[in-house]
Amino acid sequence: MKRGELIESLINIVLLSLLVGIAIAIVCMKDLFAVVMLAGIYGLISASFFVVMDAVDVAFTEASVGAGISTLLMLVVITMTGRTEHPTRHKPLLAIFVVVVTGGLLIYGTFDMPYLGAIDAPIHTHVAPRYINESMQEVGVPNIVTAVLASYRAFDTFGEVVVIFTAGIGVLALLSVVRRRDEDSVIDSINDSMHEQHLILRIVSKMMIPFIMLFALYVQFHGDYGPGGGFQAGVIFASAIILYVLLFGLSTARKVINQTLIQLIAAFGVLFYGCVGLVSLLNGGNFFDYNVLSSDPIAGQHLGILLIEWGVGCTVASVMIIIFFNFAGRKEFQQRNGNLIDNISKKNKGI
Amino acid sequence: MIFDLDIIRELISALFLFMGSFLCISGGVGILRFPDFYTRMHAVGVTDTLAAAMILIGLMLQNPDGLVVIKLSLILLMTLFINPTASHALAKAAFHNGLMPLIEKNKKNNSLPDKKQESEKG
């Protein structure tokens, strides 16, 4: 017991110091590509840290979002903006002053916080005992995190889904470009010539993509019993499609995935989630009170959680796909206007 | 008899885990000590695939019955597919962007991109 604790704290110390080291390296570096890679590693290490803390669901989200898809999106951005940070000519003394003071205040604030894992900490005495002791009777889902996220805190989760949907709308409003049909063939031929070089990658990914999608569905529908749920599943599903786009080109992917349909699915997910709440209102319960969805309260809870997770998964997956397609479409737009060949080589680097 | 088998299993598992850890560490040393991108790539690409496989087999032997073995062998299968492909992609990208392997002849030309590649790996 004692030895296990020692090893665990040793692992924690190593992981946390790695995080600090990576953060400092990110601040010091000028090469944005390296910064993005380091940010991905940062996400992966924080995911490992969460696993050590037994927060498997959070770790899963951090690994798929922080280390996976945000790295990808940042890479797409870098292909548009260029690789190096502009040198600053002035000394940012004021900024350093503000940062140091804020950081000092935050560290001062932690002195008032209870110790990590203290049994009398407010977080362990407020609602957590009820979640831990009674969620099995009230919700009937083995994974307490899913019970809290999808049932007790369904309204908060609805807010999160709306935030993600809003992000998708924002990207659509800012970045979407009107495509001219006549140039498709030019882009096609460029993509073809480029992708003949990636034969091995294409074959291996073709084998992998179905399994990635299957895994996403597993995570989606197994979220009640193990770590997972709509958010992670959506991101994993989107990453499978993004992998396809990376290797087979945007125009091929546009033939497979209809943009309008994807936007409709994004809206459908949010609406579906909200409608589950409305149905429970109409059946005489509170907003998102799943007990009234079925004659048996536990069955109602199961049904409600399944439905809203499905809505979350739809929205997250399609918003990620929308964001990626619009970023990459912007890049294509730049290519068309600028020097085609030059930009292609940059894009190759990015990939 | 069963007792003996358990000990043998533990020993084989420990051997696999030890070999895997050793290969991981040697790959890390290789990254730090080898002179250019491709040799580093080689150090990590080769050892990591084998090390991951060995550690996974060692873990399978730790708990030889049940779902764990199936899950670990799926991870092993994925690793065997993905690791070599990732190494291939990295090496190919480097080669396409004009990074030449370090041989006596172009040692001079290589000093600059070598440093850049080092920061990319980070």
Image (cartoon, coloured by chain):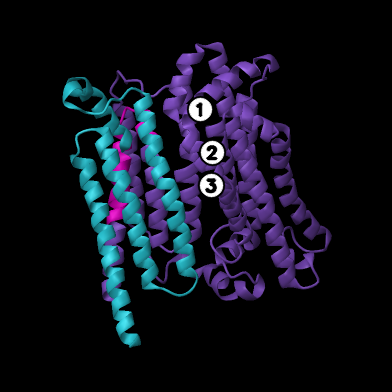
Whether the magenta-drawn stretch holds residue A139 is answered as no
- Secondary structure, mark 1, is helix
Residue B4 % position (x, y): 30, 84
**Subunit under mark 2:** A
By secondary structure, the bulk of the magenta-drawn segment is best described as helix
Kindly indicate the quadrant of the structure image that contains residue A34: top left
- Residue A294 left/right relative to A97: right
Query: Which badge, 3 or 2, is on the more N-terminal residue?
Result: 3
Residue that label 3 marks: A208
- Tell me if mark 2 has few (under 14), some (14-19) or many (20+) residues whose alpha carbon lies within 10 angstroms of its own: some
Whether the magenta-drawn stretch holds residue A35 is answered as yes
Q: Which amino acid does the dot numbered 3 rest on? A: Met
Residue A24 % position (x, y): 29, 39
Q: Residue at x 70, y 46 (%)?
A: A270
Are the residues tagged 2 and 1 within 8 Å (C-beta)? Answer: no
Whole-angstrom CA distance, mark 2 to mark 1, is: 16 Å
Residue interval drawn in magenta: A14-36
**Subunit under mark 1:** A
Image quadrant in which the N terminus of chain A is located: bottom left
Q: Nearer the viewer, mark 3 or mark 2?
A: 3
Q: Residue at x 34, y 35 (%)?
A: A98
Residue that label 1 marks: A196
User: Looking at this view, is A13 or A214 the one in front?
Assistant: A214
- Secondary structure, mark 2, is helix
Residue that label 2 marks: A243
- Secondary structure, mark 3, is helix
Which colour represents chain B?
A: cyan
